[in-house]
Image (cartoon, coloured by chain):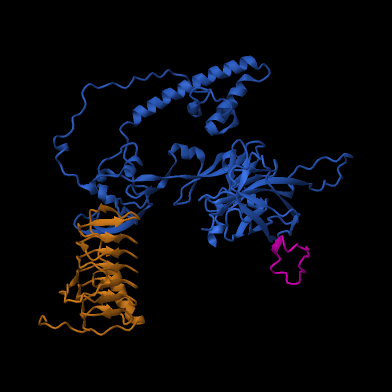
Chain colours: A blue, B orange
Amino acid sequence: MASLLQPDRVVYLVRGEKKIRAPLSQLYFCRYCSELRSLECVSHEVDSHYCPSCLENMPSAEAKLKKNRCANCFDCPCCMHTLSTRATNIPAPLPDDPTKTAMKKAYYLACGFCRWTSRDVGMADKSVASGGWQEPENPHTQRINKLIEYYQQLAHREKQDRDRKKMARRRQCMPLAFSQHTIHVVEKYGLGTRLQRQRPGAPISSLSGLSLKEGEEQKDITIEPAPALDEVEPLPEDCYSRPISLPEVTTLRQRLLQPDFQPAGASQLHPRHKHLLMKRSLRCRKCEHNLSKPEFNPTSIKFKIQLVAVSYIPEVRIMSIPNLRNMKESQVLLTLTNPVENITHVTLAPCEDDDPDDINSTAKVVVPGKQLVLAGKDAAAEYDELAEPQDFQDDPDVVAFRKSNKIGFFIKVIPQKEEDADVTVSFKIRHDFRNLAAPVRPSEEGGAAAAPAPAESIWLTHHVELRLGPLAP
Amino acid sequence: MSVKIAAGAVVCVESEIRGDVTIGPRTVVHPKARIIAEAGPIVIGEGNLIEEQALIINGYPENITPESEVEPKTMTIGMNNVFEVGCVSQALKIGDNNVIESKADVGRNVILTSGCIIGAFCQVNTCEVIPENTVIYGSGCMRRVQTERPQPQTLQLDFLMKILPNYHHLKKTVKASHNAS
């Protein structure tokens, strides 16, 4: 049954700032801390920006300048699909000889999904294939820019005051270098760095990413407050009596995607440049090592660093469930897969009665007490016909089958509650982990010729919860 | 079983045409297209493009064969329409220059005027007249009106009329009788 393989059936507990239960495929494993990490206990950083349709990479500074939009690609204002450029031949008079007409190519934008064209809003066909399309100018741009400059200056002045206070306290640091460094770091990263995060009470901390450079002269910018009007433009006379033509009215989604104009009529919906997407890298908050770092090239989906949990922690999956009846013992078949190449020893243990992690289980579970041995993952095993199968001497009551790096084993489940909800069991899984990434400790004897210490095995314990499904009727 | 195919139409032998069907000139019917006139005749105009696995059926409403004689209604299809791959059309009246995209389903009580585009996989089984130049698209069958009608597929029709006879046998043209029967 494919529903048994759904990812949310088996969840692992992550002990971070918050206790999070997530399937193993969505977790990361920090091999320096030797702990599971979820998306909420890592810091996300922007790696690079790229356009999803033309796959063009864009450096972060340029992306910020262009407001995170691609220069070449457009979005349909009607259905948000990517617009494609189409060409038609129109007869146009030759520049030299107005009497003769020659076929010239005219380009227009069209959407393949909803058949919107740029001619629908009255945009004339352009004679160049790309680069001829302009976005309409926002009438309030000047006022907004002036406001941004004023607040930038305010943030800069506040930061200088803060730095001056810090300089008074620290006497050994070079004051100029310190504030240069903070400005450089703040401007490039904004709220993402550790420096920013450790100051929760800082005023206007969200705007301190827009600070000016040191060398610019500080001219005082004053802004006038927005004037309040007494008289408001009255509604048109036929506002209530004019019948609405629904195809002309824009939907809320179409309207709010263009917050500058928010046009109410479909004939004013102009295409906008496509939003850039970004690749992110993840970093463990405790040890500051990278857990996931994608490649720079937008066309590549591989990772430079990929410390995902499925490649380090054995994975439990449900294979078959018999009919579960209240207060009756049933045998459930689970599989355990070993992702690493060396032999792993796994011990299962039921949760104690007063375990604080055990909040969801609705059934008692009896797990095999013996240690289970998992063979290593051998990539060449399917091609190697002469390999002798390793003899592990499994107890047939416990181990149902064994296949390369996977075993199937039984657990006994006794549902305790007569509810409509799913039967949930939880247990602890303890396995040995060889940390190949641990730094080589300098040996006691010293000397450059000392052999590197063999990777030590440490024992890791995880709390696993399984959702077995409803009781049989 | 009278299928009247005008001269100039290209109808492949692998297509299934049943009942009283009239096909106009310059129409191309691909192999595996099905035109079934069960509950009445079908009249197809000129310049239409009926692609593979398209189903144009003039059937009894909800597959119920009435015991009493119900007057057979004629299904009329105009000019320059495109029935893309896998679509199902039961609309009794279709105008000109419409496009029914792949896997779309048009019910019996819909009347398509001209320039309408029924998007891919959209199911339209309301009881209405679709106004001109309407585009129905998306999973929620959103609608909008476009300013110009879709262009007739003349290039594609010419290409097909040249290439299809090289690879398929064609049904013989049978001239429709001049006296209206």
- Indicate yes or no whether the magenta region holds residue A221: no
Highlighted range, magenta: A379-403
Q: Is residue A436 above or below residue B167?
A: above
Q: Position of residue A209 (x, y in %)?
A: 50, 29
- Closer to the camera in the image, A361 or B41: A361
Q: Main secondary structure of the magenta part?
A: loop
Residue at the image point whose x is 41% and y is 27% from the top: A148
- Indicate yes or no whether the magenta region holds residue A396: yes
Residue at the image point whose x is 76% and y is 72% from the top: A386
- Closer to the camera in the image, A149 or A278: A278
The residue positioned farthest toward the right in the image shown: A445
- Closer to the camera in the image, A87 or A462: A462
Task: Decide if residue A70 is on the left or right side of residue A190.
Answer: left
Q: Is residue A308 visible?
A: no
Q: Is residue A121 above or below residue B93?
A: above
Q: In the picture, which quadrant includes the N terminus of chain B?
A: bottom left
Q: Position of residue A336 (x, y in %)?
A: 67, 57
Q: How many marks?
A: 0
Q: Is residue A64 above or below residue A387?
A: above
The residue positioned farthest toward the left in the image shown: B179
Q: Is residue A28 visible?
A: yes
Residue at the image point whose x is 63% and y is 48% from the top: A426
The residue positioned farthest toward the front in the image shown: A327
Residue B139 occupies which quadrant of the picture?
bottom left
Q: Position of residue A464 (x, y in %)?
A: 64, 48
Residue B19 occupies which quadrant of the picture?
bottom left
Q: In the picture, which quadrant includes the C terminus of chain B?
A: bottom left
Q: Position of residue A56 (x, y in %)?
A: 48, 49
